[in-house]
Amino acid sequence: MMAPLVALHVLAAVIWVGGMFFAYMALRPVAASLLEPPLRLPLWSRTFARFFPWVWAAVIVLPASGWTLILGYFGGLASTPVRVHVMNAVGTLMILIFLHVYFAPYRRLREAVATQDWPAGGRALAQIRRLVGLNLALGLLVAAVAAGGRYL
């Protein structure tokens, strides 16, 4: 039971963090250098519309599988290693940041694209960029802790 749960947990993290890495490190610089706002902002709005359902799945799977492992494998918080507490805390922060992105600047980006208000869309996208950059850094930290924390 634990092996499939760990696999599901890791896959959800890889999809979320890997998607942010691709968007931030590859798509963002190319889109910014090639496309003017009337093309760039709808690209991002539609890209997020396809990516965010995967993030929602990760936001559900990660805490559910993580807490199942904490309770079932480690026997509760008291016997859980520090690295797992770090992953839990940072993961919770990442989820809160995503919820803010989804319900605030992403909503504003969609509205700006719908009304072709490119300055407002640019402000919303800039806020999303900063928050995704923060979440990417946090996600990479969690990946490093998950991969190497037991050896510290």
Image (cartoon, helix red, strand yellow):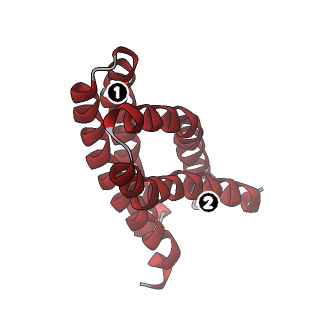
Mark 1 residue element: helix
Question: Which image quarter: residue 56?
Answer: top right
Quarter of the figure with the N terminus:
bottom right
Q: Name the residue located 38 percent from the left edge and 67 percent from the top edge.
A: 141
Q: Is residue 74 above or below residue 111?
A: below
Q: Nearer the viewer, residue 119 or 89?
A: 119
- Density class for disc 1 (Cα within 10 Å; few <14, some 14-19, many ≥20) is many
Query: What is the x, y in percent for residue 3?
Result: 74, 62
Which residue corresponds to mark 2? 10
Query: What is the x, y in percent for residue 86?
Result: 38, 61
Which mark is on residue 109? 1
Report the residue that reaches farthest toward the bottom: 151
The residue type indicated by label 1 comes to Leu
Q: Is residue 57 above or below residue 31?
A: above
Quarter of the figure with the C terminus:
bottom left
Q: Nearer the viewer, residue 139 or 113?
A: 113
Q: Name the residue located 40 percent from the left edge and 30 percent from the top edge.
A: 102
In the image, is 113 to the left or to the right of 66?
left
Q: Nearer the viewer, mark 1 or mark 2?
A: 1
The residue type indicated by label 2 comes to Val
Q: Name the residue located 29 percent from the left edge and 29 percent from the top edge.
A: 121
